[in-house]
Amino acid sequence: MNVLSRINELKEILNEASVAYYVNDNPIMEDYEYDRLMNELIMLENENPEYKTFDSPTNRIGGEVLSKFEKVTHSVKMASLSDAFSLDELRDFDKRVKNVAPTATYLCELKIDGLSVSLKYENGILVQGATRGNGIVGENITHNVKTIKSIPLKLKEPLTIEVRGEIYMPKKSFIELNLEREENEEELFANCRNAAAGSVRQLDSKIAAKRNLDAFLYYNLSQNVKTQEEALISMKELGFKVNTLYRHCNTIEDVFSYIEEMGRKRPDLPYDIDGIVIKVNEIDLHDIIGETVKYPKWAIAYKFPPEEVSTKLIDIFYQVGRTGVITPVASFKPVFVQGSLISKATLHNEDYIISKDIHINDTVIIRKAGDVIPEVVRPITQERGNDIIPFKMITNCPCCNSKLVRKINEADYYCVNPLCEEKIINSLIHFSSKPAYNIDSLGDKMCELLYNEGFIKSIADIFRLKDHYEELIVLPGLGKKSIDNLLSAIESSKSNNLDCLLFGLGIRHCGSKVSKIICKKFMNIDNIINAKYEDIISIGDVGEVIAKELVNYMNNEENIKLINELKELGLNMEYRSLEVKDSYFSNKKCVLTGTLASMGRSEAKSIIERLGGALSDSVSKKTDILILGDNPGSKYDKAKALGIYIMDEAEFLEKIKEN
């Protein structure tokens, strides 16, 4: 057998084994044999690179590195579904459907909590994988899609088709990934969906290959079938992985039963789901039922209510904030809640814990407030055992052991020791953070390291780090390049506007927006230092509490000493009003919908204003430009209906660059 024939034989054997293992969950080969054949194929392709093809299973190892993601315009818009949050909303959906199509039945599918993907095949070979993006334009992620073992590189038939589905990270892969990141002192992923999204947007496909992603496919744009159930069956026959936990329901009551059953099974599934997708099963009825500008009327996504799970509260520990506020935190047996492995949650303050009647060793109910922030909902008092320990608020700081103070009319306790190490570290972290002084490379861990090594004990010390260059470059895990980048970022930050400094100082209740208002009024730091309570309270949007805290801060000798040190170190102490440039955006009213990948909303607003435009929240006839980000909302539909110019992110960045 010649080399080419052997390579083709190995590809067929390995691709068949991948489908059997990753799609059909029915292995036909031992892992050892699979690895042996894969190594043989790798060797033959390395020796004969001209024989390596796009459908080779060696592509799943990764290795392709991009400089950036290319944009992909979808041939058919990747539309989202309207959401339902109650059974009554589903009854209304059923009535709307049956009024138009009385014979309609439903196919219910699990709503996988991942990210949408479009796959294109030409003559049966995978040629493109793309993200949903804003539904109109996505990103080319083919190099990463090829690493997902359940996605076929070659179909069983030489078809030219486009299919769509969901890439996700299994719970097991998520736990393993976060354990690895924890060992490497890297930031942990919040949940399975975020981990999957972060993995498919890696420029280096070797990273994606190691993340063990998976995918379910559920829609074939070229399908020639009569029902959605037939579509899933035919896709499975082509070699695609299809979630088999779907159900054909004749009535909306059958749908309710399926939702209830899947809700019970949800915690035990090996992947995260956040709802159920209900589609009219008969495809010929879809056109009759129709669609809105944004959503199909023949389908809807039922979202599960916030998931509540029970676990044991093991202990309550305490954190010290930058202002000295003491926050009790619940530590409980790790538990999965909506795709995240949760082991702690804030308990806010003493009054909160007492009002909830929370005891150590209680069995407690955990959920995510707003589907994001973990919270302890309540204890299950009927399961309370003899080992419970009643809560008692600490009286001394857990860091410096100084006596805590609870201020009149406040729920919080404070450490008032100015030398408390946790207070100092957190104040340094706050100062250098992106919303404040925004010093690149000076993140949480770097602040803590430099504090513990004795290089920074105050904000002023940050700007003296350059005096310790030779000592810094030999710190474990850093080196010359890291320190050069850090010192460059620190030096550049000195020109930041005064409101960044005022916010960074960490004055209680003096947030980013208020800092800007105050600086705009007084224009320089000396005017702020000398401002009287009456002067400050006269400013709109500045209340009594803020004015009092600002005056108290500026009357403290240590604080003035710090500000004077920062002056001497060359930090800008003036407020500069933004210079408005004449540009493409001059006198234009802009609206942003969706999320920009390159910047946050506040940064986009600042840039547009500097270029003479204005950013507002709502679309009207007076809107000149709609800037389109990922996952746009109803503003996109309204702008389209009004004939307003729609600008994608790439064009927005190009217009900025021109100015």
Image (cartoon, helix red, strand yellow):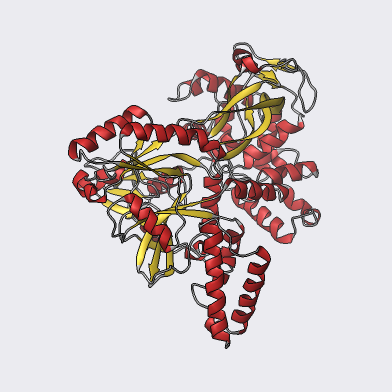
User: Does residue 392 appear to the left or right of 80 in the view shown?
Assistant: right
Of the pair 325 and 571, the residue shown nearer to us: 325
Q: Position of residue 250 (x, y in %)?
A: 31, 38
Q: Quadrant of the N terminus?
A: bottom right
Foreground residue among 542 and 422: 422
Image quarter hosting the C terminus: bottom left
Is 652 situated left or right of 446 in this image? left
* Nearer the observer, 479 or 417: 479
Name the spot of residue 413 as percent of width and height, x first.
67, 18
In the figure, 380 relative to 323: above or below?
above
Task: Point out the residue furthest to the bottom here.
Answer: 2
Q: Quadrant of residue 447?
A: top right
Residue 471 lies, in percent from the top left, at: 81, 54
Tell me the residue at 58%/60% (across/down): 27
Q: Is residue 142 above or below residue 469?
A: below
Does residue 201 appear anywhere in the picture?
A: no
Q: Nearer the viewer, residue 521 or 336?
A: 336
Query: Residue 106 appears in which quarter of the rendering?
Result: top left
Identify which residue is drawn at 66% across, 57% down: 485
User: In percent of the image, x 30 and y 51: which residue is there?
Assistant: 227
* 584 relative position to 204: left or right: left
Q: Residue furthest top?
A: 408
Residue 238 visible in image: yes
The answer to whether residue 78 is left or right of residue 348 is left
**In the image, residue 451 lies at what x, y percent?**
76, 41
Label total for image: 0
